[in-house]
Image (tube, rainbow, N blue to C red):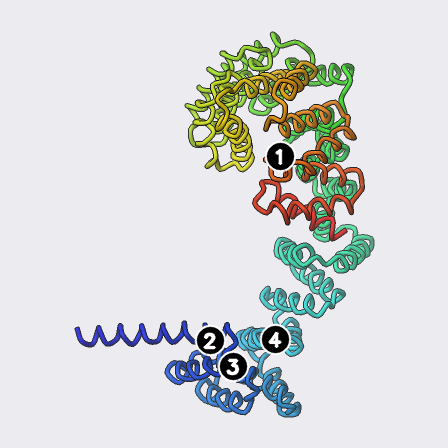
Amino acid sequence: MFLVVANITVAQDKNNDNQLALLYYSQGEYEKATDLYQKLFDESHSQIHFDYLIDCYNKLKELDKAEKITNEQIKRYSKSFYYPVKLATIYQQRGKTKEADEIFDRIVKKATKQLETCLEAGQACLDNHVDSVAKIIYENGQQKYPENRIIVSNLSRIYLNLNENEKLADIYIEQLQKNNFDLDFVENQLQFCLYEKRNPQLKNILIDKLNQIIKKNPKQTTFKELYLWLMIQDKDFEKAFIMSKEIDLEKDEDGDRVYEVGTIALENQEYLWATNCFSYVVQKGPMGSYYEEAMKNLLETSYNKLFKSGIKPDIQQIESLEVEYIKALEELGDSKTTADIIKNLAHIQAFYLNKSEYAVERLKKAAESPNLRQKKTALEMELADIYLFTNDVWGANLLYASIALNNKNNDIGHEAQLKQARVAYFNHNFKYAEALLEVLQGSTSKLIANDALELLLLISDNTALDTSTTALEIFARGDLLLLQGKNNEAVKCYDSIPALFPGHSLEDDIIMRKADIAKSENNMDVMVSYLKDIEARFPYEIYADKAIFTIASYCEKQGDLEQAKEKYRKLMADYPNSFYAPQARNRYRDLQSR
């Protein structure tokens, strides 16, 4: 027991010394830190205590002491490369250039005798920030051990640090020439070099080299695949489409690579190139592996282009799209693929063509189909949305409640619960709506959690102090009318509030709703005017961050990149915890790199 207690006491003393030494070091009290680290080093001779002690001696300009203990470590660990490299760096600091060069020469000669010594010596140089020597070691090692990925990876980082982009591009090309199965490895390396480190010069050099290789050796598909990957990363979907087609024809891939480019283009709202990709796959015919998926995505692209591009579609365009959907359903029948087609067609008919009866009948039939069992919940959600749109609030509420009950722990259940809370809000049952919304703040979906918080704050801010909820009831009525597409009636509801309740706290909410209406009607200048009003007059209210983000997005789309950057920067600085802050940060970085 005495031995155990003694050991515990010693361990605690060491831990206390470690913490105190680190505290002195972090506060710049290097003399006190040196005394403690010398004590710890004498007991352990560990590299971590050695490194701190050496750095303290450097700070105190006591390089002779640093040299002495480094020599002691070299004798103690004679096979290690780390300490000789450290000694060479000390020699360099002391002006002993000849002695330092002699050490480096010996290390370089010894390093390439075996793969392990090459890796260890190179890493020792990197750890001591001697990139120039590490570069020589790894370059020699690459010639002797051309298949080793660690050497390629470390050498590429050195070229990156030294800004030697020509060599950096060459090393990846050489790697693929040696082994075309290393494409994933090269792409992962480039992801860091090109995009995390923001190196446009390397990208341009690499693209030029790839173009030359492809021109001279058009059958070397690996380099075309790397070129395609680069085009996708840069969102140059025109070149990505052309190259994916070329690879598809050479490798007889049945359109899968072109289909993949199309899905990425669709995600990025590049509707023209998404359409070209999916049309190419569909033209391969019904026997193709991706025919049904491509047809579904082709329709979805047309749907998004029509309804999500910010331009109000005319009735002829909507009717033409309806015809395309009906044709696709007649050809494909009931399948997993057609569930989304059925859902979108029902949405078009109910929300845009005043054909709610057809839409409801179609969705009910689809929800009962055994072939669409896996998509039943999504179909029922659309059905509930149509009930609410057509003012069958009771029917919508029952269906939302059923979906939420059957999907308690997933996003679609949370979405249904959010919509159920909105129904309660429309019915002026504010307490029940608050109870549902409070639960949703912990949703795994950030969008659902943010929407729930937004509605919760709207209700709580306008019921907490007022004994009367009349203004909020009028506002909720306007929100229901807005959801049902009755914009003019909704505006009348909103405008009646300041007339009846001057200076009411709903003023910023009313302005935001009018901005939403202006956007839906493609009155973008009016929308921006409303949003700027919120930004200027209500900087501490719930919609301020959303208003700034929306203005920034609009400016970016219009090509006013400086204004967009200014708004994104403001959002990041003034609203760091906003739901929109991560998106603003990413977009700001993208704009900075252009």
* Mark in the foreground, 1 or 4: 1
Query: In terms of secondary structure, where does tag 1 sit?
Result: loop
Query: In terms of secondary structure, where does tag 3 sit?
Result: helix
The image shows residue 349 at horizontal and vertical percentages of: 66, 13
Q: In which quarter of the image is residue 563?
A: top right
Decide which of tag 3 and tag 4 comes sooner along the chain. 3
Q: Name the residue furthest front.
A: 502
Query: Which residue is located at x 60 percent, y 89 percent?
Result: 91
Whether residue 416 is visible to the viewer of this picture, yes or no, is: yes
* Mark in the foreground, 3 or 4: 3
Q: In whole angstroms, how far apart are the C-alphas of marks 1 and 2?
A: 47 Å
Disc 1 crowd, CA 10 A, few/some/many (<14, 14-19, 20+): some
Query: In terms of secondary structure, where does tag 4 sit?
Result: loop
**From what the image shows, is residue 466 above or below residue 546?**
above
* Mark in the foreground, 4 or 2: 2
Residue pointed to by mark 2: 24
Residue pointed to by mark 4: 129
Q: In whole angstroms, how far apart are the C-alphas of marks 1 and 4?
A: 49 Å
Decide which of tag 3 and tag 2 comes sooner along the chain. 2
| Amino acid beneath label 2 | Tyr
Foreground residue, 16 or 319? 16
| Amino acid beneath label 1 | Tyr
Decide which of tag 4 and tag 2 comes sooner along the chain. 2
| Amino acid beneath label 4 | His
Query: Which residue is located at x 50 percent, y 73 percent?
Result: 27
Residue pointed to by mark 1: 543
Decide which of tag 1 and tag 3 comes sooner along the chain. 3
Residue pointed to by mark 3: 56
**From what the image shows, is residue 92 above or below residue 18?**
below
